[in-house]
Image (spheres, grey):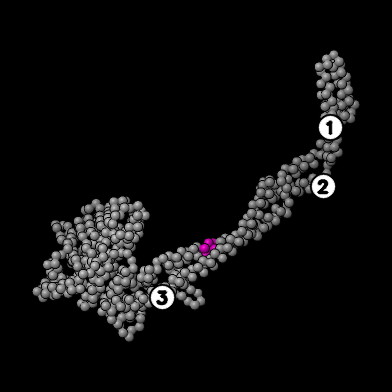
Amino acid sequence: MRKEKLRLLTSLAIHNYAIIRDLEIAFHPGFNVLSGETGAGKSILVGAVNLILGARASTEMIRTGAPEAGVEAVMQLPQGYLCARLLEEWGIDCGGELVIRRSIARSGRNRVFINDQASSVQQLQQLSPLLISISGQHEHQFLLDPETHLGLLDAFANLEGDCSEVRAVYDAWRESREKLALMRRESQQRAARMDHLRLQIQELESAKLLPNEDAELQREREVLKNAAVLNQAARKAVNTLYAEKGAVLERFSEVEKELGAIQSFDPSQIGLGEYLLQARINLQELVHALRLYADRIVFDPARLAAVEERLALLGKLGKKYGATANEMLQSLGELRNMAGEGEKSSLQEEELVKKIDALRSSYLEKATALSHKRREAAQTLSAEVSSHLADLDMPRARFCASLGGESASEPLFSPTGIDRVEFLLSANPGEDLKPLARVASGGELSRVLLALKSLLGRKGEAETLIFDEVDAGIGGRVAELVAIQLSKLSLRHQVICITHLPQIACYGKHHYVVQKQAQGDQTHSSIRMLAESERTEELARMLGGVSISAKAREHAKELLQRGRKD
């Protein structure tokens, strides 16, 4: 007896979404099949699951007349599942079961709950790769785009960690290059300013400025301009104090006699004589200072002209660098700092160039190591996909994951490494390997996609794989071979397949039918799991259309028996 994996998607409930009013469905382990008429609402179920996985919501999907739409999914998680560890980081209690609810109001407001804890769409998007993988007809177009092939190869080889390291070094290298380019642009602009900056420094340095020089010169100019008045005033003061008859110092002797008379009758005033002595000494010092000042103060036209010239220079510089000599000296210091910053920037530029070279070497080392792993994985992937295609009635087909991008002279630099990958196919003997977009038919693309999904499904943790009409473009024997592959895949994963082909539906272990009913002026979809006795009739409908013949029923019974033998 085959052992089936633990199911992941346990149940799905949908309310007022598109033409679905109220729908609840319980899914089982293994191979689940959904069938129904075109337009019955099968793909709407996939749209609802996408909402649970964080897809963009649209108010247009709310059922007519309803205020909001809602989707709820219950998932069972294995012990130690990566998703459970992520939920633990978010502080969400798991306990082995995950319940996700999402509602869309007509106002456009989204509400998300994970195990009854308010969450965000962004968190759903982080969870989605760990929960469910959905493959639909759009993935055929996905396969035709070579830009997606590198990611598929990396996923197959479990190289996500290596890719992250390469991307981190690349981002650091790119950011450093951008910083260097900016620094060099600023350096060019600074170089254009440096000549002017040097001229300014030279202009200020040649002036040989002194602190407070302007104030001192202005004082000196006033003295020189009024030298005659000052000299005359000083000499007149000397005469009054000392030189002329009846000068102040000359009359001190008279004061001294009067003080003697006071002290003779009142000895307590002996200190008055001390005051007089100090006054005489001070006046004598004053006379001496005035004589020196008068001798020094002379009218000097040459010095006055020099002072005027110096003040004119300071005034000219002041218009550029500051009103006073002190402010000009401050400006000189700032200009010197700016010049020093330019030199400092040159050193930083040199250090950044060294860092870029080191990052480039590190990038090439890591990207080359990643490239070697990719080349080994590409050979393995090519062989295994070719083997799977043989099981899908393409026995002579050759599949190749072709690597390119690295050149002998200059390797390709990109966030994903130095490689480019493109999937090539030769569907028939004698045909050269060519890009999928040029040679693959719809049926061949379906089989290539299934082969890749079968291989990638082994690598990831997503245990629920949903195939939305991935059987497009195939039929007959090929369809049955596809069904066998899906059945094998269901031994490791929960598989849910939406199909129109009875050759695939007969291999399902659990068969659901989606039906659309009209009630009055409204239409709604429903879904139910078929009993074994009902499956024959559904398969006969899929075989024979509207009119179901006895031969169709016999054929349906034969298909069911064939599916049970698998």
Residue 226, horizontal then vertical, whole percent? 80, 39
Residue at position x 36%, y 53% from top? 90
Q: Is residue 403 magenta?
A: no
Q: Which residue is mark 2?
A: 302
Q: Which of the two discs, 1 and 3, sits closer to the camera?
A: 3
Q: Earlier in the sequence, mark 3 or mark 2?
A: 2
Q: Quadrant of residue 54?
A: bottom left
In the image, farthest residue toward the top: 265
Whole-number angstrom distance, CA of label 1 to CA of label 3: 105 Å
Q: Residues within 10 Å of mark 3 (few under 14, many from 20)?
A: some
Q: Earlier in the sequence, mark 1 or mark 2?
A: 1
- Judging depth in this view, the residue of 510 and 432 nearest the camera is 510
Whole-number angstrom distance, CA of label 1 to CA of label 2: 32 Å
Location of the N terminus (image quadrant)? bottom left
Confirm or deny contact between disc 3 and disc 2 (CB under 8 A).
no
Element on which disc 2 rests: helix
Do we see residue 232 in this rendering? Answer: no
For residue 285, the mark is 1
Magenta region: which residues? 176-182
User: Looking at numbered disc 1 in the image, what kind of residue is underneath it?
Assistant: Glu
